[in-house]
Amino acid sequence: MPASRPTLRGDTPLWLDASIALLLFIGAATGGLSYWKRAAAAGQPFYYQNYFEPAVMIACGKGFVVARPQVPAMVPFLWRQVDRFSCDAIAADAPLGTDDMFQQGSWRYLMLAVGFTWRLFGVSWSALGPLFVVLLGATIASVYAVFRLGMGPVLALIGALVLSFSALHLKYFLVLRDYTKAPFTLVLIFLLGLLVTRRATWRAVLSISVAYGVVLGAGYGFRTDFMADVPPFFVTLFLFLDGGVLRNMRLKLAAAALCLATFMVSASPVLTSLDRSRPGCQWHVVVLGFANRFSGPLGVEPAPYDVNREYLDEFAYTTVTSYAARVHPGIGHIEYCEAGYGAATGAYLIDVIRRFPADAIVRACASVLRIVELPFAERPEGDEPGGDPAHEAGHGMGLALVVAAVLVAMAGNMRAGLFLLFFLLYFGGLPALQFDARHFFHFEFITWWAAGFLVQTAIDHVPRWMRQRSWQTAAASAARASVVLAGCFAVLMTSLWVARAYQQTAARSLLGSYLAAPRVEVESRPASGESEVPVRVSPHTDPETADFVAVDINGSQCGAHPTVAFRYADAARRAYSRVFHVERSGDPGLTHIFMPIYEGFGRIEFSDAPSGCVEGVYRVREPAPAAEASAGERRTLHRQFPAPCSVKFPAPCGVRSQHPAASGPTMTDWFIFAFIVFVIVLDDVLREMWLSFTATRDFVLERLRWIVLEKLQSLWRGGHR
């Protein structure tokens, strides 16, 4: 295949692209305003409007401040009980300041955007239409720019129009806080594409780096999620810049420094206010992403352990602080979302990844498989994540398109193709941190981009191949690309297998320590006919530490559908309750259920559990920490409970990694399918290459023509004798 790469084509005048982007902006804004008015009349969705007090203050000329106590007339407005607010309701002597901002400091630019919109059009939720449509127009124009990296203006225009009418896109267009990510993310992706496709000149690279830093800093002021867009820039700069990995090192270092400097400048108002807005919730979102409710949308089966069972801020806070109190006795109170909580959450996640690395890889791969199917997937109605994974998975068409696009890009330009593969794995796997559509709706363009790129490549190259009969060159390029792609696949699968082998050993050891830990039997156990056991919780501590309760179940002695329910008496903690469904088995071995219980716990309930089903209920005593061998040596965590997690596994102890659910094609099935297709294609390519070494196509055709003509002439002469 001739050398080519996905690039913003130079044969199209820049003024034409700018004109198309401007028309798309105007058209999307005009149509979006009409759509927004109809949707807003039916009621705007919730996007944490109760935190928009600083925006009201900005609109009223008070600056980026909040009032404590809150202005009474502002409360119903922030909770959307009324549509309008009058600035006259703010008393002249109202105590204003910046000391009691929750997360508004990290949303500073969002508050400014909303505040200045209200200053122009009035403080009203129904007056935010202009801000919404500006964001929509910028998003569609940015989509066009991204599409132009791989195709001509016609196909790019079609792709932008398709995305502008996407049901998933329009659904989150109405959610201001989440939709603000879309235009900034797409501009950053466009800049990454320019970094790969442009020549590595000082002017071009430094200009792109400055633009990336400015856009990144501006986006960070809307959502702190944009910190996830920092690594792709440095990976792209040092690995995929034109010229190779080792060349242009001074240019790369200068560009990296310039990008960081411009980011710090553009984000400085936000960075300086973080200490007043509880900056410790960055990793809290990731902990919430491990909730069981996201396993279904991801298409993975729940493991026999839970990192964070509930999608609930209070439950995640209790989980993290309890972990910190066990690992660091005497740590003291940890305030929610303060810096100490951020450090504790980060340490907890590091411990989780260290013990369960295969789960992280599987979740990321499952996320990629879901993202590429977004244009073809059926999604359940409503805002809550969930639904049948078999219906959400699509039909494999998206995966085929994306893999084909990466393969074609590699055949044309290996560096650009490898960048596309990195982009797919990183941005496709990133939503696994919390697999909710509000975090990935703007990635729907990936599959459409791949389809457009394939069509454009076919338009540009296939006719020339047919005219010049250069199939051998194309086959050689495709073979090389197939080998590289297969190697990348092998690296990914090897990493997963190694991680699973490590996790199997580490998790078995961890869960084995649960079994080996000292136990004290609970005084009352369920006798025949009894259905519950009260369990007393230890006195309150700060941070709150969990009491671990173990229930041993002999499944062979239970009824048809036995359950073990952990119930909380405190109404505020009813969501902490958990019901385990025990599988009835003829195997006389025990099933061990470990459950952390906190303040407010009431009792354990059993159903369909005749005499002999429940072997015992125990309170597990945490093993003592290992003694320090010398000054400065860190306390080992081998015998520590890494998290207040619920663990259920049959005896003998067995641990399985998360893996795709059996209700649909698994990730491994797709990999096997891709490998089979690769082998078939490689076989055909190698056969074609072998023919090219023995005889050219022209020679073969000429030889066949000569044989046919000679035979016809011979028959003609024989017929006239």
Image (cartoon, rainbow, N blue to C red):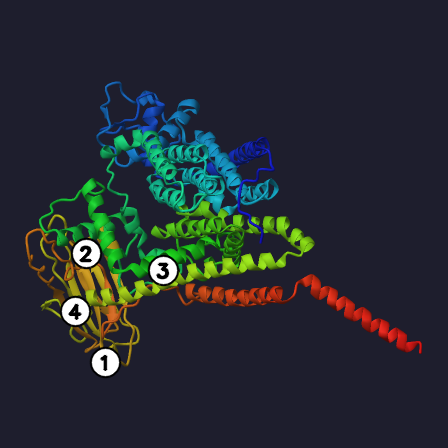
Residue 498 is situated, as x and y percent measured from the top left of the image, at 31, 64
| Near-viewer residue (587 or 667) | 667
Q: Secondary structure at mark 4?
A: helix
Q: Would you identify the image quadrant in which residue 152 lies?
A: top right
Q: Are marks 2 and 3 in contact (CB under 8 Å)?
A: no
In the picture of the structure, the residue carrying the numbered disc 4 is 515
Q: Earlier in the sequence, mark 1 or mark 4?
A: 4
Q: Secondary structure at mark 3?
A: helix
**Which quadrant: the N terminus?**
bottom right
In the picture of the structure, the residue carrying the numbered disc 3 is 362
Q: Are marks 4 and 2 in contact (CB under 8 Å)?
A: no
Residue 56 is situated, as x and y percent measured from the top left of the image, at 34, 27
Q: Report the Cα–Cα distance between label 1 and label 4.
A: 18 Å
Q: Earlier in the sequence, mark 2 or mark 3?
A: 3
Does residue 80 appear in this view?
no
| Near-viewer residue (695 or 459) | 695
User: Which-is-in-front pick, marks 2 and 3?
Assistant: 3
User: Which-is-in-front pick, marks 1 and 2?
Assistant: 1
Q: Report the Cα–Cα distance between label 2 and label 3.
A: 37 Å
User: Which-is-in-front pick, marks 3 and 1?
Assistant: 3
**Horizontal placement of 151 versus 70: left or right?**
right
The amino acid type found where label 3 is placed reads: Val
Q: Secondary structure at mark 2?
A: loop
In the picture of the structure, the residue carrying the numbered disc 1 is 588
> Residue, x 16% and y 61% (percent of image)?
638
The amino acid type found where label 4 is placed reads: Leu
The furthest residue to the right: 721
Q: Earlier in the sequence, mark 3 or mark 4?
A: 3
Q: Report the Cα–Cα distance between label 3 and label 4.
A: 27 Å
**Which quadrant: the C terminus?**
bottom right
The amino acid type found where label 1 is placed reads: Pro
